[in-house]
Image (cartoon, rainbow, N blue to C red):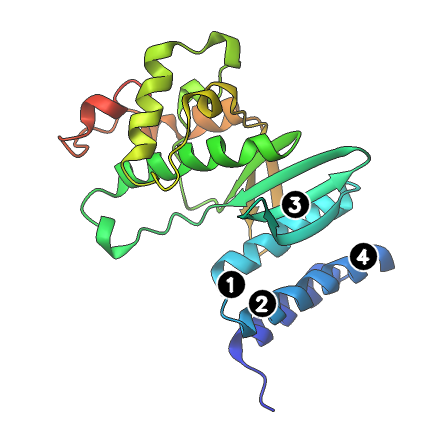
Amino acid sequence: MAVGKFEKDIMHLVNKLCEGEESYISREIRRLGDSLISMHKKNLVKINHSVMELVCAKYLISDGYYVEVERVLDGLSCDIYAQKGLGALIVEVETGFIPPEHALYPLTYLKARIASKITRYSGYADKFGLAVPPHYAMYIPSTLIEPPRARKKKDIESIKALCDLYYSNPPVSLEEIRNARIHAVYILDIENGIVEETEPSTYVNMVRPMLYGIEGLNPRFSKIVKNI
């Protein structure tokens, strides 16, 4: 049976990530590669997302985590679920993909997507992180970087209104937004297999000149997102 391009690409990356590594790390990377190949045969994963998961997974494995990919939690599938000791970490991989139906308002859509990811997933683990490639400047709502006790009611309501534009089945709750946390951003250099972990506030400062002063949002929703 011919080997498909997905499998070839995954195995090429797996071999590259295993070069010079100790046997345990290599074994774990190969386990995850096999898992992604199996899921692709069921049409559950795509290559651009999967390679990012593998690169991030290697970083976490090297840091002592046991890693699973595409784990289902209470009906919600998370990209990376990692455990170390008694603690758990969820990492969601973000490629910056815009569905065709949202092509006219990509920034508004991505703002809602990131806010929804942080809000929905962070309650399922002790820590939550987002992983992005260096060519995508991700918008993280500043409200969600603040400690929960410092969040203002109007800001929480603005994030809910933003999430409800695209993610209302089921809708996120005000309580989920109030308690949501993001602990890390992982910048993934896929070509070199390198990961840079940074604080969310540091990442926001890095991308602020590109994103946080942008005008021209969908005028229907600009009042919702301008203070987020």
Residue at x 77%, y 58% (from the top left corner): 28
- For residue 212, say whether it is visible: yes
Amino acid at circle 2: Met
Amino acid type, residue under disc 1 in the picture: Val
Mark 1, Cα crowd under 10 Å, few <14 / some 14-19 / many 20+, is some
State the separation of the CA atoms marked 3 and 2. Answer: 16 Å
* Sooner in the amino-acid sequence: mark 1 or mark 2: 2
The reply to whether residue 185 is in sight is no
The answer to whether the residue labelled 1 contacts the one labelled 4, judged by CB atoms less than 8 Å apart, is: no
As drawn, 69 above or below 60? below
Label 1 vs label 3: CA separation? 16 Å
On the rendered image, what quadrant is the C terminus found in? top left
Q: Position of residue 37 (x, y in %)?
A: 61, 70
Task: Give whichever of discs 3 and 2 has the lower sequence position.
Answer: 2
Q: 87 or 47: nearer the eye?
A: 87
Between disc 1 and disc 4, the foreground one is 1
Q: x, y percentage for residue 53?
A: 59, 53
> Helix or strand or loop: what does disc 3 sit on?
strand
Say which residue label 4 marks: 21
Q: Earlier in the sequence, mark 4 or mark 2?
A: 4
The residue at which mark 1 appears reads as 45
**Residue beneath label 2, please?**
39
Residue furthest bottom as drawn:
1
> Secondary structure under badge 2?
helix
